[in-house]
Image (tube, grey):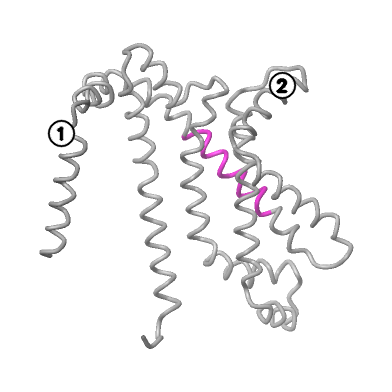
Amino acid sequence: MLVGAASTLTFGVLVWLFVINTPGWARVQESFFDPETALAAFPRVAEGFLVNLRILVFAVVGVAIVATLLAFLRTLRGAVFFPLRVLAAAYTDLFRGIPLIIVIYLIGFGVPGLLQTRISAELLGTIALVITYSAYVSEVIRAGIEGVHPSQRLGARALGLTHGQTLRLVVLPQAIRRQAPPLMNDFVAMQKDVGLVSILGIVDAVRGAQIEQAKYAEFTPYIVAAVLFVLLAIPTIRLTDWVSARLRKREQMGSVV
């Protein structure tokens, strides 16, 4: 306790010396942490944040479907499925290598130009998120499936289960436990990246903060948006830590240290 108190006190002194006590702190506080501006900008930023939440919900559902399909394609056995495995691998390699912001530009401005029609920017932003994050999440799901020992599959098939029943009843329940922590980390990352859809002109939390920043000539609205995203991420982060600790405790149960 004494060491913890001493380290906390030392950290506080360092913050005071190198942040609060600096000559420019007053100007930074006025530009980034003005309470009156924060209250005035909150309604517009909060309204835009609801747009982020709506996009996030649909993106999570889309990613879950597409990523699971890609993972199953990559785990198919037999030479007849070789083209499907190659296509799934090429998809994951391609979209794990392209930055999300470029995918948003390509989908958001390329697809309407290709189809010569107007499409909802929210829909295009959601599609871009699904395309990119499906590549990441599919690898997590595939790793979880392939991490299940082959004897589990063989035992299930010996009992007369079909390939689909083996995946659904034997492999996936074990794989999900392995996948939970990394999948939650990807979900936290998606919560932040959903703010990038603002480049398509969507008035979300980030765009709302930009509008308010131009109105008040201060950066405080961006801090308001940041706080909303942090409040959204904290429950998921804590849940991830709890699930990881629970799985670790279960795996180490009965072991001798």
For disc 1, the marked residue is 21
For disc 2, the marked residue is 112
Q: Is residue 156 left or right of residue 33?
A: right
Q: Position of residue 138 (x, y in %)?
A: 64, 54
Q: Amino acid at mark 2?
A: Pro
Image quarter in which the C terminus is found: bottom left
Task: Please tell me how crowded label 2 is: few (under 14), some (14-19), or many (20+) other residues with Cα within 10 Å.
Answer: some
Q: SS for tag 2? A: helix
- Judged from this view, the residue extending furthest toward the bottom is 256
Q: Is residue 105 left or right of residue 199?
A: right
SS majority, magenta: helix
Q: In this view of the protein, which residue sits in the foreground, 217 or 204?
A: 217
Q: Residue at x 51, y 25 (%)?
A: 198
Q: Residue at x 59, y 37 (%)?
A: 100
Q: Is residue 255 left or right of residue 15?
A: right
Q: Residue at x 66, y 79 (%)?
A: 152
Q: Residue at x 19, y 31 (%)?
A: 22
